[in-house]
Amino acid sequence: MVSQEIQSEYVYKKEKKKQKPKSRIKWNYVDSDSLVLYKDGTFHRTKFYHYHEILYSELKGEWKIEKDTLILNIKLEKESKSDKKWNEINSTITYRIKKRKIKPINGIEFYAIQNLKLVKK
Protein backbone atom coordinates (compact mmCIF):
# COMPACT_ATOMS: atom_id res chain seq x y z
CA MET A 1 0.00 0.00 0.00
CA VAL A 2 1.33 3.42 -0.98
CA SER A 3 0.62 6.37 1.28
CA GLN A 4 -0.37 9.66 -0.26
CA GLU A 5 0.37 13.13 1.03
CA ILE A 6 -2.71 14.93 2.29
CA GLN A 7 -3.42 18.43 0.99
CA SER A 8 -6.53 19.11 3.12
CA GLU A 9 -9.03 17.19 5.21
CA TYR A 10 -12.63 18.23 5.92
CA VAL A 11 -14.94 16.58 8.46
CA TYR A 12 -18.57 16.87 9.57
CA LYS A 13 -19.82 14.76 12.46
CA LYS A 14 -23.01 14.91 14.46
CA GLU A 15 -24.01 12.41 17.14
CA LYS A 16 -27.06 12.46 19.36
CA LYS A 17 -28.72 10.06 21.73
CA LYS A 18 -32.47 10.41 21.97
CA GLN A 19 -35.06 8.92 24.28
CA LYS A 20 -38.83 9.01 24.40
CA PRO A 21 -39.75 10.09 27.94
CA LYS A 22 -42.67 7.79 28.66
CA SER A 23 -41.63 4.66 26.79
CA ARG A 24 -37.91 5.04 27.55
CA ILE A 25 -37.04 3.87 24.06
CA LYS A 26 -33.51 5.01 23.23
CA TRP A 27 -31.82 5.38 19.87
CA ASN A 28 -28.69 6.90 18.41
CA TYR A 29 -28.42 9.34 15.56
CA VAL A 30 -25.09 9.55 13.72
CA ASP A 31 -24.25 11.65 10.69
CA SER A 32 -20.61 11.56 9.60
CA ASP A 33 -18.92 12.87 6.48
CA SER A 34 -15.20 13.14 5.71
CA LEU A 35 -13.37 14.38 2.64
CA VAL A 36 -9.62 14.01 2.12
CA LEU A 37 -7.92 15.91 -0.71
CA TYR A 38 -4.54 14.48 -1.72
CA LYS A 39 -1.67 16.48 -3.22
CA ASP A 40 -1.73 14.34 -6.39
CA GLY A 41 -5.18 15.77 -7.28
CA THR A 42 -7.28 12.82 -6.09
CA PHE A 43 -9.79 12.64 -3.24
CA HIS A 44 -11.50 10.07 -1.02
CA ARG A 45 -14.81 10.75 0.67
CA THR A 46 -16.70 8.62 3.19
CA LYS A 47 -20.28 9.32 4.31
CA PHE A 48 -22.17 7.46 7.02
CA TYR A 49 -25.71 8.13 8.24
CA HIS A 50 -27.56 6.13 10.89
CA TYR A 51 -30.98 7.14 12.12
CA HIS A 52 -34.03 5.44 10.64
CA GLU A 53 -31.77 3.44 8.35
CA ILE A 54 -28.07 2.98 7.74
CA LEU A 55 -26.67 4.70 4.68
CA TYR A 56 -23.01 4.41 3.69
CA SER A 57 -21.05 5.54 0.67
CA GLU A 58 -17.48 6.08 -0.43
CA LEU A 59 -16.46 8.23 -3.36
CA LYS A 60 -13.15 8.57 -5.21
CA GLY A 61 -12.10 10.83 -8.02
CA GLU A 62 -10.19 13.97 -8.90
CA TRP A 63 -10.42 17.48 -7.48
CA LYS A 64 -9.49 20.97 -8.59
CA ILE A 65 -9.97 24.51 -7.32
CA GLU A 66 -11.14 27.34 -9.57
CA LYS A 67 -11.40 30.75 -7.90
CA ASP A 68 -13.12 30.03 -4.55
CA THR A 69 -14.81 26.85 -5.76
CA LEU A 70 -13.79 23.25 -5.05
CA ILE A 71 -14.83 20.88 -7.84
CA LEU A 72 -15.00 17.12 -7.18
CA ASN A 73 -15.17 14.93 -10.29
CA ILE A 74 -16.44 11.59 -8.97
CA LYS A 75 -15.18 8.52 -10.82
CA LEU A 76 -15.78 5.61 -8.40
CA GLU A 77 -18.44 4.83 -5.80
CA LYS A 78 -18.96 2.12 -3.19
CA GLU A 79 -22.37 1.91 -1.49
CA SER A 80 -21.50 -0.54 1.27
CA LYS A 81 -18.50 -0.98 3.52
CA SER A 82 -18.44 -4.68 2.67
CA ASP A 83 -18.37 -4.10 -1.11
CA LYS A 84 -15.10 -5.21 -2.67
CA LYS A 85 -15.85 -3.74 -6.08
CA TRP A 86 -16.03 -0.03 -6.91
CA ASN A 87 -18.74 1.11 -9.33
CA GLU A 88 -17.77 3.55 -12.06
CA ILE A 89 -19.84 6.74 -12.14
CA ASN A 90 -19.45 10.16 -13.67
CA SER A 91 -20.71 12.96 -11.45
CA THR A 92 -19.61 16.35 -10.16
CA ILE A 93 -20.11 18.15 -6.85
CA THR A 94 -19.06 21.76 -6.32
CA TYR A 95 -18.39 23.51 -3.02
CA ARG A 96 -17.88 27.14 -2.06
CA ILE A 97 -14.65 27.44 -0.09
CA LYS A 98 -14.95 29.54 3.06
CA LYS A 99 -12.12 30.20 5.55
CA ARG A 100 -12.37 26.96 7.51
CA LYS A 101 -15.20 25.07 5.82
CA ILE A 102 -16.74 24.16 2.48
CA LYS A 103 -20.42 24.51 1.60
CA PRO A 104 -22.20 22.51 -1.15
CA ILE A 105 -23.29 24.59 -4.15
CA ASN A 106 -24.75 21.94 -6.43
CA GLY A 107 -24.46 18.31 -7.44
CA ILE A 108 -25.98 15.29 -5.80
CA GLU A 109 -26.21 17.01 -2.42
CA PHE A 110 -26.67 20.72 -2.99
CA TYR A 111 -29.59 20.57 -0.56
CA ALA A 112 -27.31 19.45 2.30
CA ILE A 113 -27.27 21.77 5.26
CA GLN A 114 -24.02 20.56 6.82
CA ASN A 115 -20.76 22.29 6.07
CA LEU A 116 -17.59 20.23 6.12
CA LYS A 117 -15.05 21.85 8.46
CA LEU A 118 -11.33 21.99 7.69
CA VAL A 119 -9.34 19.91 10.19
CA LYS A 120 -5.99 19.62 8.38
CA LYS A 121 -4.26 21.81 5.86
Image: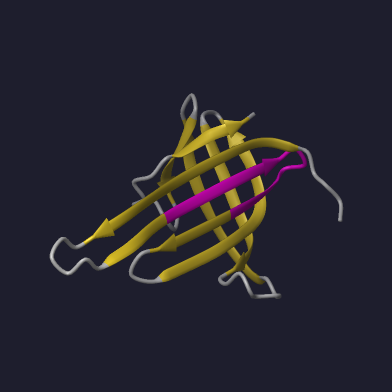
Query: Residue at horizontal 38%, vertical 44%?
Result: 114
Q: Quadrant of residue 120?
A: top right
- Pick the front one: 116 or 108: 116
Query: Residue at horizontal 46%, vertical 68%?
Result: 55
- Pick the front one: 51 or 43: 51
Query: Residue at horizontal 61%, vertical 66%?
Result: 77
Magenta span: chief secondary structure = strand
120 lies left or right of 55: right
Q: Is residue 7 magenta?
A: no
The quadrant in which the C terminus is found is top right
Q: Is residue 32 magenta?
A: yes
What is the x, y in percent for residue 32?
47, 52
What is the x, y in percent for residue 1?
86, 56
The magenta segment is: 31-45
What is the x, y in percent for residue 71?
56, 43
- Pick the front one: 17 or 6: 17
The furthest residue to the right: 1
What is the x, y in percent for residue 41?
72, 43
